[in-house]
Image (spheres, rainbow, N blue to C red):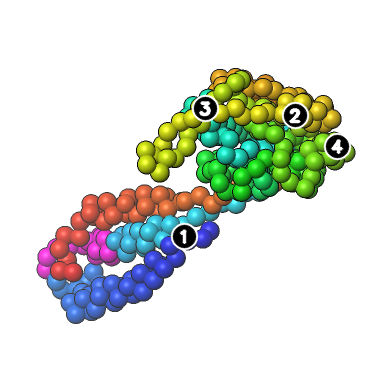
């Protein structure tokens, strides 16, 4: 057992003072035995003397328990091995400027983030990591079972964290590197992009072949509607306004990447179809993973508090019949 607010235990220094106060009062009265003249004269019995000591003992015991409760005693740490069925997944999300296009609501990037969050919620037993890419690739969150932390990273993805561009090969390489550090055969990259590879020192096909060697399966998602799409720009005079632009998507490369790694290619032209894509990927094969888990410390102050309150109530109910004015 340990105490979260251990400094509160310093209040125990005051208890000897309280005990000394009671003892000093008793000595001043001189009434310490049932044969004392005052007890005999008033008709009090030894039971009344016992009640007096009991009443004072109850209040001291209650105070001790209250101090312990305030110090927040905790107990726990039960270690155990848990087996789950899950896979290791890297979410690779394009953060190039073209992801600002608003053919998805509110835009491509925000729609991708929303669907990714739902996907994570549906796979509580998978280790999932997050890679973002533009001109280069960056791991925002390594593979983890702490999905609360992962979701915070997903929510905070922004365009501009990396210099603009589209480095699909670098994203695959970064994701493969992360997956190569974990054991198991079920390792997956879900790569979402709306553009054409134009950056990075690694060619997407080369990266895909390297990924296949270590048994990484890649599911590629091409996002964006056909034809011209609304794109927001900031005018120095009129503020935010929209223009229509053509955003190219290299579907051939994405299909080849998926084929090389025995994955699949999906096309999403709106938020609904994007959700459907993730729903299909959600049906991936699973494998057993073993996790050493433990239940953290739990508060047990309530037990001290309940017993202390009980003793305080007993203190109030005990009648000392006025033997001592203490």
Asked whether disc 3 touches disc 1, contact meaning CB atoms under 8 Å apart, the reply is no
Q: Distance between the Cα atoms at labels 3 and 1?
A: 59 Å
Residue 153 image position (x, y, % from top left): 56, 44
In the image, is 56 to the left or to the right of 42? right
Q: Secondary structure at mark 1?
A: loop
Q: Residues within 10 Å of mark 2 (few under 14, many from 20)?
A: many
Q: Which residue is mark 2?
A: 254
Q: Which residue carries the number 4 mark? A: 209
Q: Are marks 2 and 1 in contact (CB under 8 Å)?
A: no
Identify residue for label 1.
Answer: 4
The mark tally for this picture is 4
Q: Say which label, 3 or 4, has the lower sequence index.
A: 4
Relative image position of residue 31 (x, y in whole percent):
20, 74
Q: Residue at x 37, y 62 (%)?
A: 67
Could you give the CA–CA distance between mark 3 and mark 2, rounded to whole angstroms? 25 Å
SS majority, magenta:
helix
């Amino acid at each position: 057992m340990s105490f979260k607010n251990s400094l509160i235990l310093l209040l125990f220094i005051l208890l000897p003072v309280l005990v000394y106060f009671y003892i000093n009062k008793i000595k001043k009265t001189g009434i310490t035995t049932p044969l004392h003249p005052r007890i005999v004269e008033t008709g009090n019995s030894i039971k009344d003397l016992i009640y007096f000591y009991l009443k004072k003992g109850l209040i001291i015991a209650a105070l001790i328990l209250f101090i312990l409760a305030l110090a927040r005693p905790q107990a726990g740490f039960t270690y155990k091995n848990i087996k789950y069925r899950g896979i290791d997944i890297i979410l690779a999300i394009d953060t190039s400027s073209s992801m600002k296009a608003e053919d998805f609501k509110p835009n491509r990037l925000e729609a991708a983030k929303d669907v990714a969050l739902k996907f994570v919620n549906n796979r509580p037993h998978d280790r999932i990591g997050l890679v973002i890419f533009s001109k280069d690739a960056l791991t925002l969150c390594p593979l983890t079972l702490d999905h609360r932390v992962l979701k915070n990273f997903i929510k905070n993805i922004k365009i501009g964290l990396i210099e603009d561009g589209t480095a699909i090969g670098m994203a695959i390489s970064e994701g493969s590197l992360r997956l190569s550090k974990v054991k198991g055969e079920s390792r997956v990259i879900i790569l979402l992009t709306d553009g054409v590879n134009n950056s990075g020192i690694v060619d997407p096909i080369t990266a895909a072949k390297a990924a296949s060697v270590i048994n990484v399966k890649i599911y590629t998602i091409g996002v964006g509607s056909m034809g011209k799409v609304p794109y927001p720009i900031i005018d120095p005079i009129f503020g935010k306004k929209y223009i229509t632009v053509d955003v190219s998507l290299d579907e051939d490369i994405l299909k080849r990447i998926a084929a090389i790694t025995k994955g699949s290619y999906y096309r999403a032209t709106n938020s609904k179809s994007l959700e459907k894509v993730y729903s299909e990927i959600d049906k991936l094969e699973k494998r057993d993973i073993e996790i050493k888990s433990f239940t953290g410390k739990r508060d047990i102050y309530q037990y001290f508090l309940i017993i202390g309150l009980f003793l305080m109530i007993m203190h109030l109910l005990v009648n000392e019949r006025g033997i001592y004015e203490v």
